[in-house]
Amino acid sequence: MLHDFDLSSSETYDPTRMSNTRYSGLALGVIKLLVILSAFSLSGCTSAARSIEIEKGTVAAGKLTAEQLLRRADHAWSNRGEEQDRRKALALYQTFHDRHPDDYRILWRLARAYYFWCDYRLGQIRTNEAKKLPYLRKGLAYAEQARELEAHQIEGVFWNGVLLLRLSQIEGVLKGLPRLGRIRALLGQAIARPNAYNAAAHVALAGVEIALQRAGLLWVKGDMAKAIDHLHQAVRLRPRITLSWIFLAEAYRLTDRKSDAYASIRHAIELPPEERLGVWYPDAQTDESRIDKRLAKRLLGTWQTKDK
């Protein structure tokens, strides 16, 4: 059977924010970060995964070899700006896993898919974030299995780290703080040697520090010098990503470097549309962060109003 997933698209959402009442996360001033990939409106779901017959006319996965199946799934995923391709990719990934449940390649791909799937299906911040937990836990289980199988490979390590971070953001301070060491260690492994996820790991590590600083806790603060250093590394590695510049602007703002903050946010706004690529997907062939520019403009407007 080829699995099918009910997805619907519209906007994007930022997975590095803290959503607990005390962990406000990367609110970026008075607004919420609605960024990173394609965002998606509420489409209604009843379980963390369901399988049905694929639409009539789609190629039968049973006729494909394992390698053909994976290549076809990856191709669909690289064009996931279209709902049809997202649905097809996720269905093919799950079908591959049904056949090869211990294959490292499919385990980290499913971890990646579930990381974003919860936002694809459940929409943006206005939805009940608790509903996302089953998806994230399923993705984390895939990531942990991948890392156990191939501890030296970066994909399992990276997705393990960001899924654990995302869970902590939703579950709150009491569960999140004890995980910080683990999260930092996993993402630290992702930047320890050159790989396609270096920039994304730097952004996520910076996001941890910014979120801690924004939370206003008395017993723990974010290391803003470290956050800025991570973001400098991210923009050095991939200077065309709008999101990295937005985070850098926010980090400067939190350290009272207003002129640097304004310069960074204006740089984010001025990046050409074709260069606003997605940080979280090195394979992206579509504009993964198409609303980042709009977010940067809103943030700039908010700052200009406050600084009058």
Image (tube, rainbow, N blue to C red):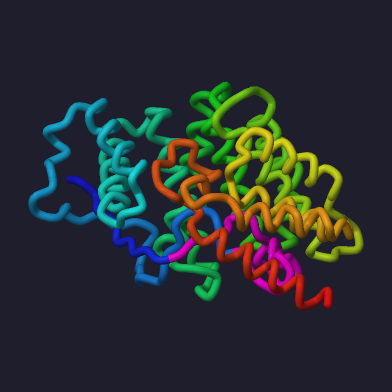
Quarter of the view holding residue 266: bottom right
Residue 104 is covered by the magenta coloring: no
- 272 lies above or below 298: above
The residue shown at (24%, 33%) is: 69
Q: Is residue 60 left or right of residue 307?
A: left
> Which residues, given as a range, are shown in magenta?
11-33
Q: What secondary structure do most residues of the magenta stretch adopt?
A: loop
Q: Position of residue 61 (x, y in %)?
A: 17, 39
Q: Position of residue 160 (x, y in %)?
A: 57, 40
In front: 119, or 177?
119
Q: Position of residue 68 (x, y in %)?
A: 22, 29
In front: 2, or 221?
221
Answer yes or no: is residue 140 visible.
Answer: no
Q: Position of residue 142 (x, y in %)?
A: 46, 40
- 121 lies above or below 78: below
- 117 lies above or below 180: below
The residue shown at (28%, 53%) is: 87
Residue 31 is covered by the magenta coloring: yes
